[in-house]
Amino acid sequence: MSGDNTSSSKRSGVNALISVMGMTSQQIASFLITLLAAGFLSAASYGTYTLAIVFDEFVVMLIYTGFFHFVVNSDADDETLLSTLFWIMAGIGTFGGALLFIFAEPIADFFDAPDLAMVLRFFGIMQPFASMNGWAAAALTRAGLMKRYFLIMLVVNIGGVLAGCAVLALWQSLYGLIVYRAIRLTIGLVLFGWSVPIWPRLRFDGTLARQGLSFAAGLYGSRFLSFFSTFGTDLILAYLFTTAESGLYRFANRLAMASVDIVAQPMRSFAIKRFGEAGRTKKPLEIELERFLSGNVFLSGLVAVMLIILGASVIETLFRPEYLAAVGALQALAIRAAGLSGAQLIDPVFAARGTTRISMYFNLIWTTAMIAAIAIFSSMGYTALASAQAVVVILSSATAIYAIKRYGKVEVGAALRRTAAALGLIAAFAIALWLAWTTLSALVTGKLLLMISGIVVALVLAAVTMAVAVYLKVFDIRIFE
């Protein structure tokens, strides 16, 4: 029996390493491209690109939500399900891409950003192919081939960022960023097409499509509201202020989200898989909730603390001086990114329960709260607005736990106790890192050397804290099995 446990732990460790490397590569790639873009482009040009990303992400959200979850959770026959959903998801990508292409000029005029139209047109052309990658990701997740999925992500992101860095170094413009995204998409198409267990066929089941639409409706409503609560600030700031000011906010938001998503994205992918399996097999959700809630809070909290303490040094050392104005917003948005830990479990839990409309109602309430915060605090500047958003997000996560208990019929006591222990370890890590950083700041001269020293010390302290968390069973590495 002990041999089986040892083997299971080794598999968990290997899967954890592969999953974190796969999803971490995506965030590292995003960070490196952000680094190059912010180094080569003005805040206004960077703001134009990231504004285009908001519209691109809306179509991506339609692809990776709703029907994506239906693929993972449905107990229908694999071949019929995957073929039917391929045509649906490809249709969503094609329709969304066409809208981006057609309305590119009016959108650019509305935001008074002439270069935006060109970027949106190229993104629109890419959307049908991006939807195929989304279907393949859902097929691999359904099949439980997470190791294969994360290995593909690793290759896609490494290959994409290497090519992207080369292109941006030679072509320092918005066109270079577009070429980077096209290269990354092409690599994904090749690898996903080669790796999916079942290829789509000319088969479409109308009954299954209607079931999928009914299932997806609640999640689409939920994710639409969640999307606006996340990206609504970008749109409002782009409309109210210059692209330079909105670019600074989006720079801070991109840096915070990319950093926290290094650990949060693998957790989200495994949560969809694990809760989906539990829902299909009628297993209780309490164990998965305990593991993922505490795990989300612990890992996201570690990264948020590092951003808050070291963020100013990183920006001062690596980016143009104009980006230093974004430090306060970065710190607040790091808290916001970590504060999503509870709210992000709403969709997996209620998808597993088959009651996705609860997700929509939940996000309706908190999107309304976020819109109110935007309306009240936007005139005070993007730092105050980012701080208000952090408060709203933390409250939404607390409410998410209540909704899971009351409407999802999942006991949350054990999850809350383990999460409280995780918060205690994060507080200890924060104190240790702050003391170490204060000491380094007094002893080390030179911005680059100081930043590197701080990052190395932070990673060492994070590794020690992780080891303690695993030993005390605060963090359960078996979530990556």
Image (tube, rainbow, N blue to C red):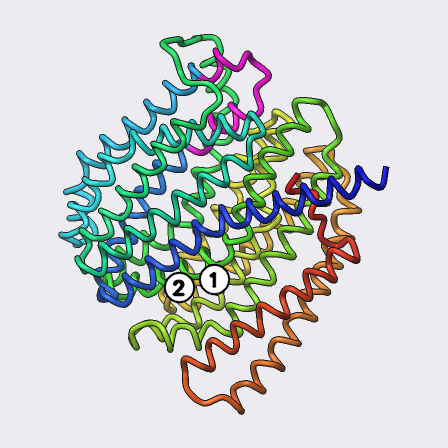
Give amino acid for label 1: Leu
Give amino acid for label 2: Ala
| Relative image position of residue 307 (x, y in whole percent) | 50, 68
- Tell me if label 2 and label 1 are in contact, CB under 8 Å: yes
Q: In the rendered image, which quarter contains the C terminus?
A: top right
Q: On screen, 293 above or below 311?
A: above
Q: Residue at x 58, y 87 (%)?
A: 439
SS assignment at label 2? helix
Label for residue 333? 1
The chief SS type of the magenta part is helix
Q: Would residue 159 appear left or right of 459 to someone viewing this image? A: left
Tally of numbered discs? 2
Q: Residue at x 56, y 57 (%)?
A: 338
- Number of residues whose C-alpha sits closer than 10 Å to that of mark 1, classed few (under 14), some (14–19) or many (20 or more): many
- The answer to whether residue 310 is magenta is no
| Relative image position of residue 177 (x, y in whole percent) | 24, 52
Nearest the camera: 290 or 129? Answer: 129
- The residues colored magenta run 64-82
| Residue 319 quadrant | bottom left
| Relative image position of residue 130 (x, y in whole percent) | 33, 34
Nearest the camera: 153 or 69? Answer: 153
Q: Earlier in the sequence, mark 2 or mark 1?
A: 2
Q: Would residue 303 appear left or right of 427 to someone viewing this image? A: left
- Number of residues whose C-alpha sits closer than 10 Å to that of mark 2, classed few (under 14), some (14–19) or many (20 or more): many
Q: Which residue is mark 2?
A: 252
Label for residue 182? none
Q: CA distance from mark 2 to mark 1?
A: 7 Å
| Relative image position of residue 330 (x, y in whole percent) | 44, 67
Q: On screen, 203 above or below 70?
A: above
Q: On screen, 248 above or below 29?
A: below
Q: In the rendered image, which quarter contains the N terminus?
A: top right
Nearest the camera: 25 or 211? Answer: 25
